[in-house]
Amino acid sequence: GAPAAYWREVIALDVPKMVHDSKLPILVLQGDQDVQVKKADDFELLQTRAGDSSGRVTYRSFAGLNHLFMKVERESTGAEYAIPGHVDPAVISLIADWILLH
């Protein structure tokens, strides 16, 4: 439902270059069951193209979690977004630890 102008802007972004060129520490997280951002098509491609910039970029994926970092029993469809849930504690812990280190 986003307007065409939004998608044109998103498509024009070179995210791997932006990550590689940034001087800031970056944390990239992925739920393996994410239906919106695919692990092989997005997460792993970003990791391959942008690299870790001498340890400045941290990548972590989480098995069994969807786009909202909530556990799913089967492949995510996005329909489960309407079901109340909680962000997996491992994600919260990793974010907190990462912030304290950076």
Image (spheres, rainbow, N blue to C red):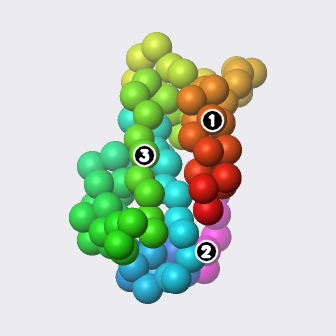
Q: Are marks 2 and 3 in contact (CB under 8 Å)?
A: no
Side of 70 where 12 appears, left or right: left
Where residue 12 sits: x, y (%)?
45, 83
Side of 46 where 37 appears, left or right: right
Query: Label 1 belongs to which residue?
Result: 93
Question: Which amino acid is tagged 2?
Answer: Tyr
Q: Quadrant of the C terminus?
A: bottom right
Quick one: SS at disc 2? helix
Where residue 20 sits: x, y (%)?
39, 79
Q: Is residue 29 above or below residue 14?
A: above
Q: Is residue 91 above or below residue 51?
A: above
First in sequence, mark 3 or 1: give its number: 3
**Label 1, residues with CA under 10 Å away: few <14, some 14-19, many ≥20:** few
Question: Which amino acid is tagged 1?
Answer: Ser
Point 63% across, 26% down: residue:
89
Where residue 37 sits: x, y (%)?
44, 49
Residue placed furthest toward the top: 73
How far separated are the C-alphas under marks 3 and 1? Answer: 12 Å
Q: In terms of image quadrants, where is residue 94? A: top right
Query: Label 2 belongs to which residue?
Result: 6
Q: Is residue 68 above or below residue 3?
A: above
How far separated are the C-alphas under marks 1 and 2? Answer: 33 Å
Query: Label 3 belongs to which residue?
Result: 60
Q: Magenta residues?
A: 1-7
Q: Nearer the viewer, mark 2 or mark 3?
A: 3
Question: Which amino acid is tagged 3?
Answer: Arg
Where residue 38 sits: x, y (%)?
37, 47
Can residue 78 be spotted in the picture? no
**Label 3, residues with CA under 10 Å away: few <14, some 14-19, many ≥20:** few
First in sequence, mark 2 or 3: give its number: 2
**Label 2, residues with CA under 10 Å away: few <14, some 14-19, many ≥20:** few
